[in-house]
Image (spheres, rainbow, N blue to C red):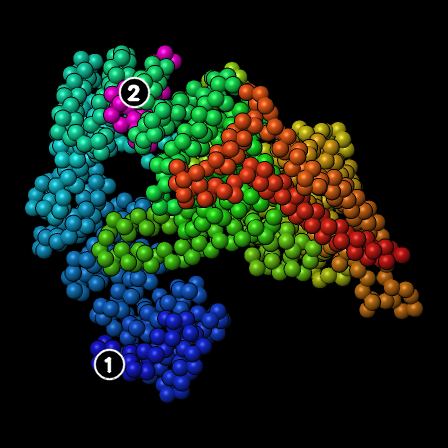
Amino acid sequence: MASKFGLTGGIPERRVRPIWDAVDSRQYKAALKLCTGLLAKHPTSPYALALKALILERMGKPDEALSVSLNAKELLYSDNIFHFDDLTLSTLQIVFQRLDRLDLATSCYEYACTKYPSNLELMMGLFNCYVREYSYVKQQQTALKMYKTVGEERFLLWAVCSIQLQVHFTSGGVKLLALAEALLKKHINSHSLHEPEALALYISVLEQQEKYDAALEVLSGDLGSLLGREEDKLRLQGRLLAQASSYAAASEIYQKVLESCPDDWESFLHYIGCLLEYDVNLPKPCTGEHTCPSCSVDSALSNKTSLSQELVESRLTSALSFVQRLQENNSSDCVRGPHLANIEIERQRCLNGNPNNIKLMEALVKYFHRFGHLSCSASDVEIYLHMASGNEISELLDEISGSFDASSVSVNTLGLTITLFKVQELLGTLFTKPTTELQGIAKRMVDTFYKNLSLSNELDPQESMYGEELLSMASSIFVQLYWRTRNLGYLLEAILVLEFGLTVRKYVWQYKIILVHLYSYLGALPLAHKWYITLEVKNILLESVSHHILPQMLNSPFLQHAADLVKDYLKFMDDHLKESADLTCLAYRHRTYSKVIEFVQFKDRLQRSMQYLSVKSDSVMLHLKQKADSLDEVESILESVSHGTKLVELSNDDSMKRLTFNEDLEARPWWTPTSSVNFLSESFDEGSTPASYRTKMCKHKSNEKDGPKLKDAERKSLVPRLVYLSMHGCTTFLREGESNGASSNVTAAVETKTLLEKYARSIGYSFDDALGIVLGMSSGKKTVKDFAPDIVNWMSFAAFINAWNLCSTEPVIPGTDRSSINSWLIVDNLFKTCIEEQLTDASQMLTSLGNNIPLLARMVTEPISWHLLVIQSCMRAMTPQGKKKKKGGPLERPNTPHLQAIQISVNCMADTLQNVQTWLSDQMRPEEQALDALLSHLQGTSADGPGQISRTLDESAAAASSEIGGRIAQSLEPWSSAGVVRRIVGAGDETIAELKKLCAQKLKLLKLASASLSSMLH
């Protein structure tokens, strides 16, 4: 290559190096100036042009960068170029990739490989282009060509990886596995294999064809030595033997694994499974489903064997002896596996015909005596605890509480105390306790936390505190007390204990997540948003954690905050999907072939994310909401997203079935297991058992894919297109003299009906039924409350029905024709009825959690916005054009009946929004008055009401001394329960002010529209 002779792209390196240094230091203007000088001396250099294109792209000038890149491409294709160097092509590839024109980069490499078919560097560049395009067949062909050219093992493995990708992602690819096996066998016979990854790839090809015996033969041969760690080789052998149903041999292999790695819990489960002749593979949920881990593991371990009871007992006795030997040989407190194994063996005895729980309980008690001080001990045995009866649970709790002196201050004592509380929480026994006792337990938790603060004094501020779980559990109890009693004081105390913990140490993410949900429920969204921002969620966590705040913000008046969250999420997703192939190229280059499959599967999973589809629709809708007062800006937004057609395509039935759900629901509080479910909105059922609530939570999580979230995503993807068709249809119908208006109107009407039918199905009704419901609610024959959960969607549906009525060639409303103005009245009546219903039922902000601010915000920013866009489009279409004045006559009169209907609608919307403004103003009370109202819920003096904890926290902060640590005492100096409540009041006022601002914007628009309509009519 030219670079070997001191040249870079055919240009001396000393002239190019300063340009790259400027680019690397982001001094793009200086780099462009240097590059312009270079081009003056080398005007026909493709490399110099590629450099300029790269600089222009970095400067944010994509159009200029593309033009310069195409010039460089033309020069490469010209006959004047006698040599292709990979540096020029790779620079162009970077530019084309960032411009989302991978096809141009690929065509450059394809042309270069045609001219120089034996050039390995060019072929590798072409292979990488195919990797970025996910063109698996061409990857395979190019890799095989390189293998035939130089005979290197890596290129054969690249081809085999490409075959495996075809198997994973294309139909009929399984037949290619035989080809991959044949290629590897031929290479092994002539050259053997030299890398552990190569062996793993060969084994996986055989596994996929269910050739387990052949794989075992390979592993036990000379090639098996490629695996560096003996334990890895044994695990692989055990898995293959189990898959081949050679359970006896597999169990012996897993015994060897456990002897060297006694804490390998997964291997132990495989060992037990093989002994009982079914392999216990820990469940890996489908990419499109949520599962409850405890329930899924419970299910996996509950398989019953077909062996006789005597044989099962014999094998389990043998396993118990083996486990006891492991316990004797590994006495360290760090090794928990053998002790957990003892519990699992007793559990298997219970499941297979020996329901004697005595030994199971004895094993649990021994486990807690030995490991109860560890924070993980309760979660370790959660699935076993659920097998215990009520009496056994009581005995177990007595055993744990009697095993330590709760009055002493030490890390171990604190650990055992937390474990005792955790066991009660996991088992749900707190649900059965009376209110007074629950308050006492919560107070003990808070007192224990404060008493042990001194243990955390020497820890780094970012380290986890000793006992931090206590405040989370105490907060959970207060939430439960609120659910039972509906006393707001308990909810405030749930917040106060977490705020107190964050005052001591501000990095406890568990506190922050719970606060996000508590503040969201309370209606103090600014505080929820503030705590979420402090979590500093980045990268892939944006996909798995955003569900904690995004749904609430999307339904709030804080449009800009929601837009920022959506922007950050989409930036990560778009960047990752665009650049994820670079990781795959890196995996190929570093010969980590297992990662090749993993990276591609991960990218595919993210690309099919339900949240990704939903947020793309949310992004467009947020822009529409923010700019709904300007018709021109709305049209520009819609044009930038192809008028909503791409979103509609993404929401087709096939795509929706393949969606994946990647949210981490386990971090959510128990009372809101998914973003669409909140138990606090339901009444507390005194007769429910802890097991029933556990089942209910698991059911909600596992049903998330088929729940309202999916329907909501599908419905939102239709809205931008419906908004465009509504605006376009009205304009086409009402504007006179539009060329080909009738034809385009018919097309728009047909598409609108199709989308409205889909929209109606997403609410759960056929189109005709949905239309009947809208008419019923508008006329008062049906009550709005019966359809309350989806009332905003019903209002939007009515707005789109009205717009469709204008452009349809057939009557939309039964008993009318398309020129009828009844559809305007239907929308007016429905909107007025729905909003008045909310204002009538709405309660005082914060002091009563029935407030309807989120619902009102959605009504104002969605259906009313869509209706106002239709009104603006109609007005623009009917504005008289001065050039159409008839000879000797007045200006042409607009469509008066429709103008009158629009004016009535404008006045109705203005009156309705004015009522909302008035209600919001009534909510705004003087700060001190609102503060006193909230604090009154914490003024209780009795032993069975809220207020004790807030006083305890204030007294503890005031009495904080150097005994608990100087730094902690200093951090508690500014603490005040009243200060926290004051911030809650401020957040409520901020929410009201934001919604008032939105209403004021709509009222200003309506005032201008009314004035314009009056001038048009008179």
User: SS of the residue at dot 1?
Assistant: loop
Q: Is residue 941 above or below residue 850?
A: above
- From which residue to which does the magenta span run? 365-392
Q: What amino acid is at disc 1?
A: Gly
Q: Which class describes the residues within 10 Å of circle 1: few (<14), some (14-19), or many (20+)? A: few
Q: Position of residue 483 (x, y in %)?
A: 55, 25
- The residue under label 1 is 6
Q: Nearer the viewer, residue 245 or 607?
A: 607
Q: Position of residue 183 (x, y in %)?
A: 17, 52
Q: Residue at x 57, y 50 (%)?
A: 561
Residue 497's tag is none
Q: Residue at x 27, y 50 (%)?
A: 595
Q: Nearer the viewer, residue 372 or 123?
A: 372
Q: How many marks?
A: 2
Q: CA distance from mark 1 to mark 2?
A: 77 Å
User: SS of the residue at dot 2?
Assistant: loop
